[in-house]
Image (cartoon, grey):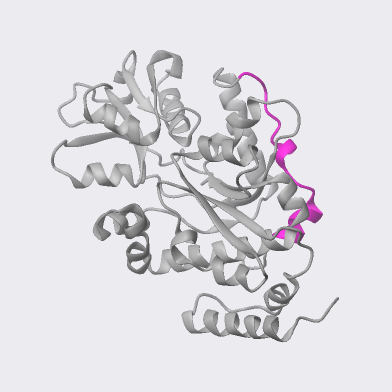
């Protein structure tokens, strides 16, 4: 292996000092090694990172830019995307290299095409307690329970985790998606349609949910939040060719994403102040969003992959997707996961 240059060694030492001062984690010898080795096995000069309109703590933390700059890589943030389905469309079109979505968008994307998908799963994300998402009605609505949604107009982003929450909640009371009237809109449009009286209910999440909850203009009730439904937490996806050709860069990104996630969960007020300008929201609202979110990453274990397969099987049984989906088609060989998964992800 070629020895790192003097500037590279200085960069490694600088990062070690930064992490020690912040107290984010104890830097292991293998992670020090990965900091040095990450200059190897890369073909890209630009990394295109996607972010959604709901906010991105990795983007807000600004941790990845100096790390990639030291490796001669330019970071290009692509977005904001309205939701996961739009982000995956960009990934499939080659406009994005890495992005984070919920459990549903990759399933719907894979079901819409034949053959191996253009994306692969590169990391899991820890789930929230479910309070950051809900099936919402107005406070004075005659709809009192999820069962009362039968035949009603419900606004949500089709193919997103909002659909999974709704479908599973309906299943709990013996109903299906076909028992309601779908008002298919982007998350922001769905909220607006609900507030304007063009839908009986809305399935939404933060930060839009926190915004509505913080205003007194339209009092709301949550019929069902995502507790015990939002158990996967979502995933980081990578463009297949980018991941296989640039494993060291993927590892660098995941290291920094986990660092940002750990810091966010320990320091919600600091992160809220960093996110607020991007979201153009009051810091108090953003802090509420941060405190009921989960930002840590987790390794893609067989159990997590099997759980994602069960979500795909559920959608097929519900006739929400046109064909059976095999999640393994978007899963890398174990050796490739060893190459891209950093030590600080458990």
Side (left or right) of 244 relative to 187:
right
Task: Please state the extent of the stretch shown in magenta in the rendering.
Answer: 322-341
Tell me residue 100's x, y (percent): 54, 48
Nearest to the observer: residue 81 or residue 200: 81
Side (left or right) of 315 relative to 275:
right
The residue under the point 61% across, 41% down is 91
**272 versus 245 height, above or below:** below
Nearest to the observer: residue 108 or residue 315: 108
The residue under the point 32% across, 29% down is 202
Residue 61 shows in this picture: yes
The residue under the point 70% across, 38% down is 118
- The quarter in which the C terminus is drawn is bottom right
The residue under the point 61% across, 50% down is 98
Asked whether 325 falls inside the magenta stretch, the response is yes
- The quarter in which the N terminus is drawn is bottom right
Residue 346 shows in this picture: no
Tell me residue 285's x, y (percent): 26, 54
Asked whether 5 falls inside the magenta stretch, the response is no
**269 versus 191 height, above or below:** below
Tell me residue 204's x, y (percent): 36, 36
Side (left or right) of 63 relative to 287:
right
Nearest to the observer: residue 173 or residue 245: 245
Tell me residue 308's x, y (percent): 61, 38
Q: How many marks?
A: 0
**75 versus 329 height, above or below:** below
């Amino acid at each position: 292996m070629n020895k790192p240059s003097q500037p590279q060694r200085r960069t490694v030492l600088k990062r070690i000092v930064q992490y020690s001062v912040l107290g984010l984690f104890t830097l292991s010898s293998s992670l020090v090694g990965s900091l040095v080795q990450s200059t190897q096995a890369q073909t890209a000069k630009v990394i295109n990172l996607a972010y959604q309109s709901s906010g991105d703590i990795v983007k807000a933390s600004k941790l990845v830019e100096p790390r990639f700059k030291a490796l001669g890589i330019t970071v290009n943030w692509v977005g904001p995307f309205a939701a996961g389905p739009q982000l995956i469309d960009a990934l499939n079109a080659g406009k994005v290299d890495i992005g984070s979505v919920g459990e549903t968008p990759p399933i719907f994307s894979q079901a819409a095409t034949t053959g191996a998908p253009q994306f692969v799963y590169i990391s899991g994300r820890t789930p929230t307690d479910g309070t950051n998402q809900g099936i919402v009605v107005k406070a004075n609505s005659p709809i009192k329970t999820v069962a009362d949604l039968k035949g009603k107009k419900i606004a949500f982003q089709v193919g997103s985790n909002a659909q999974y929450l709704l479908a599973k909640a309906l299943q709990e009371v013996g109903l299906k998606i076909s028992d309601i009237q779908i008002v298919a809109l982007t998350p922001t449009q769905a909220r607006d349609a609900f507030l304007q009286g063009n839908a009986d209910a809305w399935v939404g999440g933060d930060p839009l949910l926190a915004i509505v909850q913080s205003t007194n203009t339209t009092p709301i009730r949550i019929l069902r939040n995502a507790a015990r439904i939002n158990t996967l937490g979502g995933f980081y996806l990578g463009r297949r060719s980018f991941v296989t050709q640039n494993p060291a860069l993927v590892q660098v990104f995941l290291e920094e994403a986990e660092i940002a996630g750990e810091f966010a969960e320990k320091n919600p007020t600091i992160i809220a102040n960093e996110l607020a300008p991007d979201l153009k929201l009051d810091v108090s609202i953003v802090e509420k969003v941060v405190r009921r979110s989960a930002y840590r990453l987790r390794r893609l274990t067989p159990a997590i992959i099997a759980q994602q397969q069960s979500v795909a099987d559920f959608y097929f049984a519900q006739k929400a997707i046109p064909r059976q989906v095999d999640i393994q088609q978007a899963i890398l060989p174990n050796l490739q996961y060893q190459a891209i998964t950093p030590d600080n992800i458990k």
